[in-house]
Each structure stands twice: as C-alpha cells, then as structure tokens.
Amino acid sequence: MRGSSMTDIGAFNEKLVLQTIRSAPQGIGQSDVVRLSHLSRQAVSLITRRLMADGLVEQAGRRISGPGKPHTLLRVVADARLAIGVHLDPAHIAVVICDLAARPVARTTLAPPTEDPRADLERVAAAIAELSRSLGASVPAPGEGEPSTHRRLLGIGIAAPAGLDADAGILRDPPWIPGWRDVPVVDALSAVTGLPATLDKDTNAALTGEIWSRHLETSQTVLYMYVGHGVGSAVSGGGRVHRGGTTQAGEIGHLPIGRADQHCICGRHGCLCLYTDAHVLVGAAHDAGVEVSESSGTTAALEALSAAAAAGSAPARDIIGSHAGALGEAMRILAGVHDPQRIIIGGPTWPALRDVGEAEVRDALGDWLASSGGVVESSHLGDDVGAIGAASLFLEQELAPGTVAPGTA
C-alpha cells in the first residue's frame, strides 16, 4: 500500500482489534475482543488504550453478565475518522463523506461527467472541500503533521464503471463516459485534494459498502447485482470481494440468458445487456407511448417510468417487468455458478425499478429460493450506493487487517 494515511493504526493487530470492536456497534466487552481476535489479553488491553487515546474507541457503559464485576463495553467513535466516496456515474457524480460505519454524514450530487475530465475533477475537489468545511473535518497540511484526532479525513475512494486499471488508478475506457479514456483519476484527484485515493469498479464498491456497513457474516458467499446504466455483478467470500486477475470479474453484460429473439453486436443472441441496459427501457417507454422525458437524464426518465407504473400504466409495468425478468434469469445462472447464501440487488437505478421489479426477480429465482434457503433482498444503501461503496473501499483499505486495496496513491 502506497501513502497510507493511518500511521496511528498501521499494525495488523491494531486493525484487528478495531475491526472487532467496530463489528459490535452497541458495544463489546474486552474479554469478547480477546476471544474473537485470538490475541492475548495483554495485547488487547494495550491496543485498546492506544485506540482510546487516539479518539477511535470509547467506553459505552457497563454490562452485567452473571456474578462478578460488570464488564466495561467498548465501541468505535464512528465520526473520529471519515472517508470520502466519489462515484463517477454516467448519470451524475455523487460525492459523500462517510463515518467509520459507512454512514453518510454529508453528501452532494454534481452534474454528470463531461468530456473534460480535468474540469470535472476540479468540480469534485471543490465539492469535497465544501463538504469537509461543513463538517469541520481536517486533513494534514504539508509540514503540519497530524491534525486533531476528531473528524480526521482518511482519503478518497473512487468508484467508476469498467474498464479501468485499478492498480494503476487509471480509467481506461469506461462506458457511457466519453472523454475519460486513459485518465489517471487517482493521481489527478489526489493532486488537487492532497488526500490519498483508491479506485475500483462501481460493482465492487457497492458490495464492499454492503459488507462494511452491515457487518455481513464473513462465512457467507454474497452475490451482488448492480443495476445502473448497465447491469454488472460482484461476488464475495470470506468477507472479501473477488476482483479477478485484472479487476474485471463480474462483467455480465454479454451473459447469454437463454433467449434467441435478439442478436447482439458481439455476435451472440440473448445477451443480458439487450434487455437490461437503461437506454433499452427508455426506448421501450417511448415506443409504448409512456411519457419519460430524457431532458433531465436517464435516472429521471426511469423514475418517470416507475411513476407511470405506480399510476397503473400497464405498458410501464410490462417494460419494468421484462427488465426484471431478464435480470432474474441472469441471477439464476450466476447463483448456479457462485452458490451464494445471499443475493443483494442494488445500484443507482434499482430504487426506481424495485417496486415492480423485485417480485419479478423473485419469481425467476423461485426454484433457487426453494432449494437453497438463500436470501434475496434489495440494497438498503439507496441510489448513493456507488459513492457509499467508494468510501467503504477506503475504509476497508485503511482499517481491515491484511487488506490492501487496488489503485492507491
């Protein structure tokens, strides 16, 4: 890892203790930390004192558990450290600042990326500066050493569509974002903000956000379906997202879902993207006479489609239902490949499609649900999932023991 900003909790054992305490938001006794971390009582006591001195951990009352002395509970001070999340989505640029629980404490939405990446990143930097000022958050200035322990900014996570080179921190050729070819986004944003940054795919970021914010069981295999301008997937096992050899795992736009009615430019029939890309839904709405003006962007058009469905428009419900049916077929195939215990559906356009779409997805997954006992649910992170996930990328990198995120500056 290059340029780590967390010198005060750089050791593996410190991160392990901090993560153990963080996984119990209501508080945890020191003896339980010893048991769960498999560290010695002396080591945990020493690390806990250091974390409390750094303002990262505090006492959270006492718990009586059987005879003897009450146990002092420990919990993480969630806003002691903050991470910034930036989601470069074709529909907009979302910027959030999250606490250690991946809860947004400040957020803003900017106009979509243009063909001028430098100007766009200056807009992002200005938004970060404004949000930071509103929170009183601090970052070390050159020559000043560490800032105050409270509300310290760690760095920036950046989420974007593939293709990208996460290790190099470069957007190579992201779809639907013209002008952003071979942009060294990590170095560029670090240069204008003075903060370290990391880059990953929006699908990986979204799943990281779910794992980090919800403390999902690490024993579970989790499949995440990301619904945005296109559809992607991510999968995790052991609490870690599988990124593949080049961070391209989960690119499922050209996954054949068993339909032969449409021919794809890739040469195959029935590719998922032919039925689930956002522009397909908007085009179908126009063809069916459903009023979905695109002047305010694709997300607004899909929200209008959803509103029409809620108002009783049969064509609108059929369009969303067809999208969800194709999504469900893809999920059924991927469930057979990955054998997950939990499937989460999210992404920036899913909230607009969920009311009609979720039932269709469940219907497509009926056999899997009955045989596996698995869980299918919609993300609780809403349409900010990409930005919250991006912030979680940096939190994971800095605070998860043994983790080094790709694309770090």
Image (cartoon, rainbow, N blue to C red):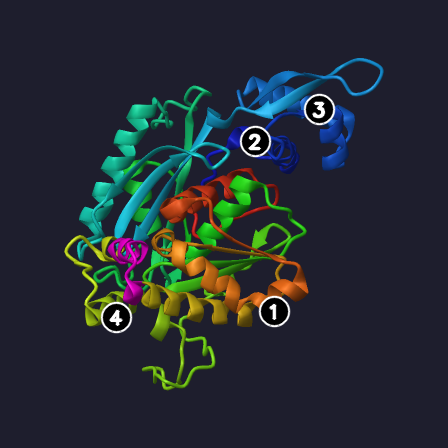
- Nearest the viewer among 140 and 224 is 224
Question: Pointer 3: what residue?
Answer: 29
- Nearest the viewer among 218 and 365 is 365
Q: Residue furthest front?
A: 312
**Residue type at mark 4?**
Ala
| Numbered badge on residue 284 | 4
- Left or right position of 249 against 236: left
**Which label's residue is closer to the chain start, 2 or 3?**
2
- Left or right position of 148 against 90: right
Magenta span of residues: 302-316
Q: Mark 2 against mark 3, which lies toward the viewer?
A: 3
Question: Pointer 1: what residue?
Answer: 367
Q: Is residue 226 above or below residue 141?
A: below
Question: Pointer 2: what residue?
Answer: 9
**Residue type at mark 3?**
Gly
How far is the residue under mark 4 from the one under mark 2? 53 Å
The residue located at (32%, 28%) in the rendering is: 132
- SS at mark 4 in the image: helix
- Mark 3 crowd level (few <14, some 14–19, many ≥20, 10 Å Cα): many
- SS at mark 2 in the image: helix
